[in-house]
């Protein structure tokens, strides 16, 4: 993801029937990731893994564009 300087994006997320996990890996620059009430300052080379069960926001508070990779994985439903 190319993330412009000063950009912010937020996602409402709540409880789901399937557990969904996301991992962010910052390739260039710096971003702030909020997961619920937790805030994480990430720089190039940092990774953050979390469940998508709370509101999530990404913010680039710098004057330089950032780049990051995102992986999203859903836990398969159990067959009964």
Image (cartoon, rainbow, N blue to C red):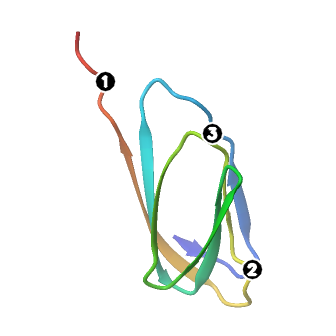
Q: Earlier in the sequence, mark 1 or mark 2?
A: 2
Question: As displayed, is residue 56 above or below residue 47?
Answer: above
Q: Would you name the residue on which mark 3 appears?
A: 13
70 or 48, nearer to the observer: 48
- Callout 2: helix, strand or loop? loop
The residue identified by callout 2 is: 61
Residue 6 location, quadrant: bottom right
Q: Residue furthest top?
A: 80
Answer above or below: position of 79 versus 39. above
Q: Are marks 1 and 2 in contact (CB under 8 Å)?
A: no
At 67% across and 90% down in the image, what residue appears?
A: 64
C-alpha distance separating marks 3 and 2: 23 Å
Q: Residue at x 73, y 72 (%)?
A: 7
The crowd level at tag 1 (other Cα within 10 Å; few <14, some 14-19, many 20+) is: few
Residue at image position (33%, 35%) is 75
Image-based side of 33 in relation to 49, left or right: right
Q: Does residue 56 appear in the picture of this structure? A: yes
Whole-percent x, y for residue 59 in the image: 70, 69
Going by the picture, which residue comes out furthest to the left? 79
Q: Residues within 10 Å of mark 2 (few under 14, many from 20)?
A: some
The residue pinned by badge 1 equals 77
Where residue 78 appears, x then y in whole percent?
26, 20
From the viewer's perspective, tell me whether residue 79 is left or right of residue 54.
left
Q: Secondary structure at mark 3?
A: loop
Q: Position of residue 62 (x, y in %)?
A: 72, 86
Total numbered badges shown on the rendered structure: 3
């Amino acid at each position: 993801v190319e993330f412009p300087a000063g950009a912010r994006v937020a996602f409402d997320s709540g409880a789901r029937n399937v557990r969904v996990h996301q991992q962010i890996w910052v390739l260039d620059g710096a971003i702030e990731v909020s997961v619920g009430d937790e805030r994480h300052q990430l720089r190039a080379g940092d990774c953050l893994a979390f469940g998508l069960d709370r509101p999530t926001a990404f913010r680039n508070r710098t004057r330089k564009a950032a780049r990051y990779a995102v992986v999203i994985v859903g836990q398969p439903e159990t067959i009964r």
